[in-house]
Structure formats: structure tokens, C-alpha cells
């Protein structure tokens, strides 16, 4: 017998797991371009300009007869997308766990988002309402798809591999975001040489993110496998009722709930820094748009290295300790940002580098640590609550940032006010006994966590 062709069942299982993990990475590669090119860079300014073109003499547009200031339309559309996601995610998560058929739901969410994003090519003239509808659909679909995507992690990686697998997924996403952003910026900055207008260049950049998302989503949809769900009684409940049912179930696992609270707090700080850093750079430091775009690109590139580096640190020191260290780094970075001199792009790039190095790792390890705290068979349901913490509950930070600026008139005071989220998140996370939390959830406790 040719022993080279004989594989043990354990070898087959490991090979299948590696294949599935590689497919899982590619979904982050597929969808992260939407977050980077569409939400972070191009859509906000462009949709605002379209709304302004359609506004009346007082600067208002009137979607469904409601007067809305054109400059606020983008923010309101993002908020509406969060509300829609809050309604849909718990419902879809419970259905995924009940049936075990996550992949068709992931495909539906991914291609709904990709189609809506590709449709942004048609946002010319005064079609602000079309832009708002497409943004709401794409953003909500992205949240639902990411919830389902994250819920695969406990199924495709044993406990000892999750930190590394989660970190590689984030790294793939940031790498794709950086690559496509470079291509988009080449088109945008040289649109005359390509024979297209500036507006057409932006629309091509928006639509290309949808095409990228849809094309690369084929890989995980081919490689990820559905698992047979354990028998569970009852049907999925409507949105908020299902979320309430999930939270009630979490009360039987108070340490899992304690981690989620800590994550909600420090992630609110992370998301606020991401969303407000460009405002701080432009308004307080007097930096131009090109400088800010280069800073975003720098964050994307260094987040790849940061996610992989913190993943290696977690293998040595454990995920909890590494996350706590990253929160200290966030605090130091914000404190340094308070003292940045105005009109000095180099120092702003240093700040962006600091953010990039801790951004991917702190998010990746939080995801993998939470995956240990989820009771078996409830992955999608619990990750819907996690995704709501990630995307739907990050409103306190922007509110504090805005109120601080309103009271002090200083963006420096506003940015330093966010330190409280990292300090409080550190304290809350440090108090969670993660080994006991993992055991209480019914999962094996890794040697190092």
C-alpha cells in the first residue's frame, strides 16, 4: 500500500479545517473594502454634496416630506441603518442557530449589501434619496453578514487556534482595504488623465467596492460548511423580542455579559477615535484632505501588522492580557494626540501609526476571546449581541466628543475626553475571570487565555 496516499481521520479533519479557515479569511478580504473606501473615505462627502445640490434655498432636503438639513442627511442615514440592523440581526442570528443553515443567510446578506453598494454608481445629479436608501440597505446588510461571519469562528477553530485565526481574518480585511484604497486614490487623484469627471471617479470607486465584495464572497460561500443544529423548540421572535430573549439567556452566563459590557465600553472609544480622528486633524490641526487620506491608508497598512503581532503576543501572554495592554496603548496614543502641534503632518502620521498598530489586534482578540464565552449552539444568537455592541451601541463616545467640544470649544479637550472609555474598559475587563467564564459557558478552557 502506498502510505503517501493514506491520510488519518485526524489529518483529514485538520486539512478540512485549514481549508475552511482560509475561506473564512477571504470574507474579511471581500467586505472590508466597503468599510474603508465607501464609509470611511468617499460616501459621506459625496452623498452630502448630492444632498446639497438637491436642497432648497434654506439648505434643507425633504425626504418623505420631512425637512432635513443637507449636511445631516448622511449621518441620519447611518443612524437609520443601525436601527434596521438592530431589528434584523437578532432575528437572523436566532434563525441561523435554530436551523444550522448559516451559509444561505450569509449569502443573502452579503449579496444584498454588495448589490446596494454597486448601485451607488447611479448617485449622480440630485439623487440623494436613492443614496440614502442604498446606504441604509448596504450598512444594515454588512452588519448582518458580519454577525454571521463572526459566528463561524467557534466552529472552524479549536480554542487554542482562535486568537491566531481571528487576527489573520482582521489582517486580510485591512490588507484588502489598503490595496483597494490605493487603487481608488489613483483613479480619484488622476481622474482627468483617465478621462472621467471627479464625480464619476467617486461613483466608480463606490461601485467597485460592491463588485469586489460580491466577487470575493464566492470563496467563503464555497468553503464554509453548515453544521447540523441541535434540536431547539420555538421559532425566532421579532427583532427586539429576540434580542431581549438573548439578553435574558445571557443573564444565565453573567461573566459572558460582564465581558460584553467591558467590550461595549472600550469599543465605543475605539469607534469614536476612528470616526472623529479626521475631524480632529482637519479642524484642530489644520491638515488638508490629502494628508488625512494618507493617514487613513497608513492606519490600514499598519493594522495588518498590528493584528498579526498582537495575535502572536496573545499566544504567549494570553488574549486577555494582550487586550489589556492594547487599552493602555490606546490611552497613551490619545494622550499624545492631545499635544500634537497644529500644521505638522508628520506627527499626525505618527499618531495614525500608533492607532493602526493597536486597532486590528484589539478588535481581533476581542472577537476571539468572546468566542470562548458563547454557549455551544448559540453562536449566531450571541454574536448578534456582540455585533450590536460593535456597531449599534457606539453612540456615547460621539455624544461625549460633541458635548465636550460644545462646552469647551476645543477639539483637544474633546479627544482627550475619550480616554475615559479605555480606562473604564480596562477596569471592567480586568475584573472578568475569563477562565471561569469559559467553563461556565460549557467550553474547554485553553491552556493560555
Image: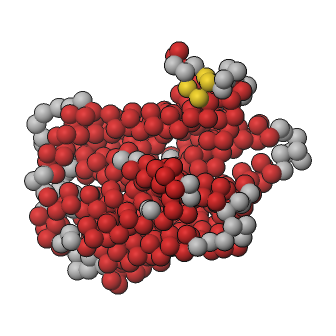
Q: Residue furthest bottom?
A: 316
| Residue 54 visible at all | yes
Q: Within the image, what quadrant is residue 19 found in?
A: bottom left
**Left or right position of 229 against 323:** left
**Residue 214 point in image, percent of width and height:** 55, 42
Q: In this view, does 106 lie to the left or right of 62?
A: left
Count the marks: 0
Query: 318 or 234: which is nearer to us?
Result: 318
Q: Residue at x 72, y 27 (%)?
A: 53
Q: Position of residue 128 (x, y in %)?
A: 63, 27
Judged left or right of residue 30, residue 394 is left
Q: Which residue lies furthest to the front in this view?
A: 408
- Residue sitting nearer the eye, 377 or 394: 394
**Looking at the picture, does residue 18 appear above or below residue 148?**
below
Quarter of the image with the C terminus is: bottom left
Q: Which residue is nearer to you in this view: 101 or 293?
A: 293
Residue 195's place in the image compared with 269, above or below, is above
Q: In which quarter of the image is the N terminus?
A: bottom left
- Please name the residue shown 50% across and 46% down the image: 218
The percent position of residue 443, horizontal first and vertical second, equals 17, 65
Compared with 112, 208 (above or below) is below
The image quarter containing residue 73 is top right
Q: In this view, does 91 lie to the left or right of 303?
A: left
State how the image is colored. secondary structure
* Between 384 and 270, the one nearer to me in the picture: 270
- Residue 383 rendering spot, x and y as whole percentages: 30, 51
- Whether residue 116 appears in this view of the structure is no
Which residue does the image show at 50% across and 34% down from the upper left? 76
Task: Please tell me which residue is depicted at 50% across the width and 69% down the height of the picture.
Answer: 334
Amino acid at each position: 500500500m502506498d502510505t503517501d496516499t493514506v491520510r488519518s481521520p485526524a489529518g483529514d479533519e485538520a486539512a478540512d479545517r485549514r481549508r475552511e479557515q482560509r475561506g473564512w479569511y477571504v470574507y474579511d478580504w471581500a467586505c472590508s473594502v466597503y468599510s474603508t473606501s465607501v464609509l470611511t473615505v468617499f460616501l459621506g462627502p459625496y452623498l452630502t454634496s448630492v444632498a446639497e445640490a438637491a436642497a432648497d434655498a434654506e439648505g434643507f432636503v425633504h425626504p418623505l416630506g420631512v425637512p432635513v438639513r443637507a449636511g445631516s442627511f448622511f449621518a441620519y442615514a447611518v443612524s437609520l441603518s443601525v436601527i434596521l440592523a438592530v431589528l434584523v440581526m437578532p432575528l437572523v442570528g436566532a434563525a441561523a442557530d435554530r436551523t444550522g443553515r448559516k451559509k444561505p443567510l450569509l449569502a443573502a446578506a452579503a449579496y444584498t449589501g454588495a448589490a446596494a453598494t454597486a448601485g451607488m454608481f447611479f448617485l449622480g445629479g440630485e439623487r440623494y434619496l436613492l443614496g440614502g436608501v442604498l446606504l441604509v440597505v448596504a450598512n444594515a446588510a454588512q452588519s448582518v453578514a458580519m454577525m454571521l461571519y463572526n459566528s463561524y469562528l467557534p466552529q472552524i477553530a479549536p480554542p487554542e487556534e482562535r486568537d491566531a485565526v481571528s487576527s489573520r481574518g482582521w489582517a486580510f480585511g485591512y490588507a484588502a482595504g489598503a490595496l483597494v484604497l490605493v487603487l481608488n486614490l489613483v483613479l480619484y487623484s488622476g481622474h482627468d488623465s483617465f478621462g472621467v469627471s471627479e464625480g464619476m471617479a467617486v461613483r466608480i470607486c463606490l461601485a467597485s467596492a460592491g463588485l469586489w465584495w460580491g466577487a470575493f464572497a464566492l470563496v467563503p460561500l464555497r468553503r464554509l460548511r453548515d453544521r447540523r443544529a441541535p434540536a431547539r423548540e420555538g421559532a425566532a421572535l421579532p427583532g427586539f423580542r429576540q434580542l431581549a430573549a438573548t439578553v435574558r439567556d445571557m443573564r444565565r452566563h453573567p461573566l459572558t455579559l460582564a465581558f460584553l459590557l467591558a467590550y461595549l465600553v472600550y469599543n465605543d472609544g475605539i469607534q469614536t477615535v476612528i470616526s472623529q480622528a479626521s475631524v480632529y486633524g482637519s479642524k484642530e490641526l489644520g491638515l488638508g484632505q490629502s494628508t488625512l487620506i494618507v493617514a487613513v491608508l497608513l492606519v490600514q497598512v499598519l493594522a495588518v501588522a498590528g493584528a498579526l503581532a498582537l495575535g502572536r503576543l496573545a499566544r504567549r501572554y494570553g488574549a486577555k492580557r494582550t487586550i489589556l495592554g492594547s487599552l493602555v496603548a490606546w490611552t497613551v496614543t490619545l494622550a499624545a494626540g492631545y499635544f500634537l502641534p497644529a500644521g505638522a503632518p508628520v506627527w499626525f502620521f505618527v499618531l495614525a501609526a500608533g492607532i493602526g498598530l493597536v486597532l486590528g489586534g484589539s478588535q481581533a482578540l476581542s472577537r476571539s476571546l468572546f468566542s470562548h464565552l458563547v454557549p455551544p449552539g448559540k453562536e449566531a444568537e450571541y454574536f448578534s449581541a456582540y455585533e450590536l455592541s460593535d456597531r449599534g451601541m457606539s453612540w456615547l463616545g460621539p455624544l461625549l466628543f460633541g458635548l465636550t467640544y460644545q462646552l469647551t470649544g476645543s477639539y483637544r479637550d474633546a479627544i482627550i475626553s475619550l480616554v475615559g472609555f479605555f480606562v473604564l474598559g480596562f477596569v471592567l475587563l480586568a475584573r472578568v475571570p475569563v477562565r471561569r467564564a469559559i467553563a461556565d459557558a460549557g467550553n474547554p478552557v485553553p491552556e493560555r487565555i
